[in-house]
Amino acid sequence: MSNIEIKTGDSLELLRMIESESVDLIIADPPYNLGKNYGNNHDVKGFKEYLEFSEKWLQEADRILAPHGTIYVFMGFRFISYLYDILDQRLGMHFNSWITWHYTQGVGRTRGFSPRHDDILMFTKTGDFKFNLDAVRVPQKYYRDRNNMAGANPGDVWTFSHVHYSNPEREDHPTQKPEALVARMVLASSDEDDLILDPFFGSGTTLRVCQVLNRRCIGIELNPEYAELARRRLARPFRGFDSLDPRVNRMPKDLPRKGIGGLADKQMLLLNKETQ
C-alpha cells in the first residue's frame, strides 16, 4: 500500500497543499447534491453554494493537473451542464468526451422513465494529452481483415453493472462505483507509476484500482470511517475486479482460424495480473 496515500479532511483545503502540475490524472466523484447521507455529512447545499464549491475545487484540480493530464468527473443530471461550463468556459480546459455510464438496474419509476445512466465529463489540461487506446480496446463483434485489427475503441457509452448490495465486493457506501469502470480511465489516461488523484474517494475504488494497476494515488475523504473502510479494502487480497465490460470476452464472429484473437485474454491478464 506504499503507493497509496490516504488523506482525511476537507478536499478543498487538502487540494491547496498539492504541488502545481504534479498530478497525471484526476478521477473525481463529488457529491451530486441530491441529499444522500455520507455518514458524517449530508449531500445538501443551496444551488449557488454548490456551484461555488464546484468551481473552487475544479480550479484547484486545474492547477495541480500536469500539462498532459486528464480529469474525469462523475456528475448527476442536475449539475453536469454547469460543471461543463466551469471546465470549458471559466477554466479553459479542453473538452474530450461526455461519457455515458449505462447500467441495467436503477431506481424504478411508475410515472416517467426510470434513470439507467450516469454521466462522466472528460476534459484534458491541454490538447497534447496522454491516451493509451491499446490498453482499453474491446473485441469487435465481427472480424475485419483490415480495420481495427487490435480491437475497437470502446466509445463513449460504457456498460458496467452496478456493484449491487448483494455483491460480496460491496462496501458500506451509498455510491460505490465499479472497479472496471474506473480501471478503463486509469489504463487509458495514465501509465504505471503515474500519480492519480481522487479528491472524494468514498469507498476507495480508485485507490484499489491504482493499487492493482501499479499507479501512485492520493485519495482525499472527509469521512474518517470511509477512510478506514478503504484501508481495510486495500489490505484484502485482490481476486479480480467486481465488474467487467461484457464485450471484453467477446470473440469476433467469422474469426479465421489464424486470425487475430487474444485481445480478451490480454486484457483479462492485465486487469487480473495480481491474481497470478
Image: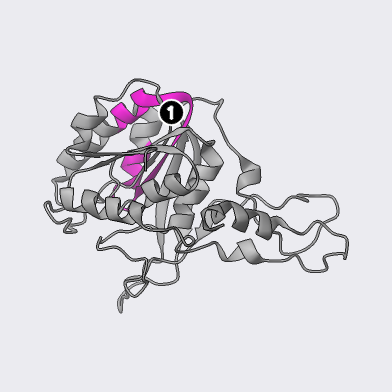
Residue ID for mark 1: 93
Q: In this view, does 58 lie to the left or right of 51?
A: right
Residue at the spot x=53%, y=36% of the render? 192
User: Going by the image, does 118 lie left or right of 221?
Assistant: right
Extreme residue toward the left, this view: 40
Q: Residue at x 58, y 36 (%)?
A: 131
Residue 272, image quadrant:
bottom right
Is 188 above or below relative to 194? below
Could you tell me the amino acid type at mark 1? Met
Q: In this view, does 80 lie to the left or right of 273?
A: left
Q: Percent from the top left, x then y, of residue 1?
A: 37, 43
Quarter of the figure that contains the C terminus? bottom right
Nearer to me, 37 or 214: 214
Nearest to the observer: residue 182 or residue 93: 182
Q: In this view, does 112 lie above or below 49?
A: below
Locate residue 109 relative to residue 37 in the image: left or right. Answer: right
- Residue 217 placed where, x, y %? 38, 38
Provide the residue span drawn in magenta.
58-84
Q: How many labels does the image show?
A: 1
Q: Residue 8 at x, y = what percent?
A: 20, 40
Name the residue rendered at 43%, 28% in the picture.
Answer: 93
Q: Which residue is drawn at 75% across and 49% down?
A: 148
Tell whether position 233 is magenta. Answer: no
10 Å crowding of disc 1: few (<14), some (14-19), many (20+):
some
Horizontal and vertical percent position of residue 264: 66, 59
Q: Is mark 1 on a helix, strand or loop?
A: loop
* Residue that protrudes farthest toward the top in the picture: 20
Q: Which of 220 and 145 is in front in this view?
A: 220
Q: Is residue 80 magenta?
A: yes
